[in-house]
Image: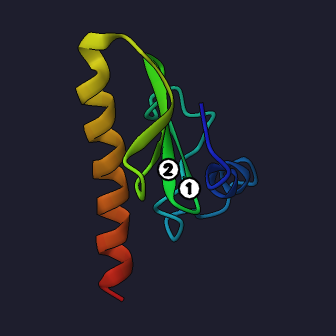
Amino acid sequence: MCSNVDITTTLLKQLKLPAEKYFWSKDIFNPYGPEFAYFELNTGFGWKRNFGEQVLSIKDNYYYVRKVNDSLKTQLDMEGKSYLQYWFDEFMSY
């Protein structure tokens, strides 16, 4: 499971080049790597894990897609929002 930002580290690792500079990217061929995919929308984000996925419009606080077991909805929601908040804070620190 991967997103478009993971292509950078994956290719660099295949070419045996350093990839530490791209800390937001992961090597999709690493069997011990985390299994998730994140993508952005103009007004929201998508978050996918092996147990479910969701696409959320933050502007409308509305889920366009939500395929997840009811008992894991909160976990999926918190993971996606936490991931987004982490990278937003990183961006704002520049």
What is the three-letter code of the residue carrying label 1?
A: Glu
Outermost residue toward the front in this view: 60
Residue 77 placed where, x, y %?
31, 36
Left or right: 51 as drawn, with respect to 78: right
Q: Residues within 10 Å of mark 2 (few under 14, many from 20)?
A: some
Q: Residues within 10 Å of mark 1 (few under 14, many from 20)?
A: few
Q: Quadrant of the C terminus?
A: bottom left
Question: For numbered disc 1, what is the local secondary structure?
Answer: strand
Residue 11 placed where, x, y %?
73, 52
Q: Is residue 73 above or below residue 36?
A: above
- Give the residue displayed 30% in from the left and 61% down from the top: 86
Q: Nearer the viewer, residue 56 or 52?
A: 56
- Give the residue displayed 45% in from the left and 29% down from the top: 32
Residue annotated with mark 2: 45
Q: Is residue 31 above or below residue 68?
A: below
Mark 2 vs 1, N-terminal side: 1
Left or right: 28 as drawn, with respect to 54: right
User: Would residue 48 be seen by someone viewing this image from the given angle?
Assistant: no
Q: Nearer the viewer, residue 15 or 7?
A: 7
Left or right: 41 as drawn, with respect to 80: right
Q: Is residue 77 above or below residue 85?
A: above
Residue 9 placed where, x, y %?
62, 55
User: Would residue 20 be seen by someone viewing this image from the given angle?
Assistant: yes
Q: Please report contact status of discs 2 and 1: CB closer than 8 Å, yes or no.
A: yes
- Give the residue displayed 35% in from the left and 70% down from the top: 88
Residue 21 placed where, x, y %?
51, 71
Q: Nearer the viewer, residue 82 or 12?
A: 82
Residue annotated with mark 1: 40
What is the three-letter code of the residue carrying label 2?
A: Phe
Question: For numbered disc 2, what is the local secondary structure?
Answer: strand
User: How much space separates mark 2 and mark 1, taking CA atoms?
Assistant: 4 Å
Left or right: 9 as drawn, with respect to 89: right
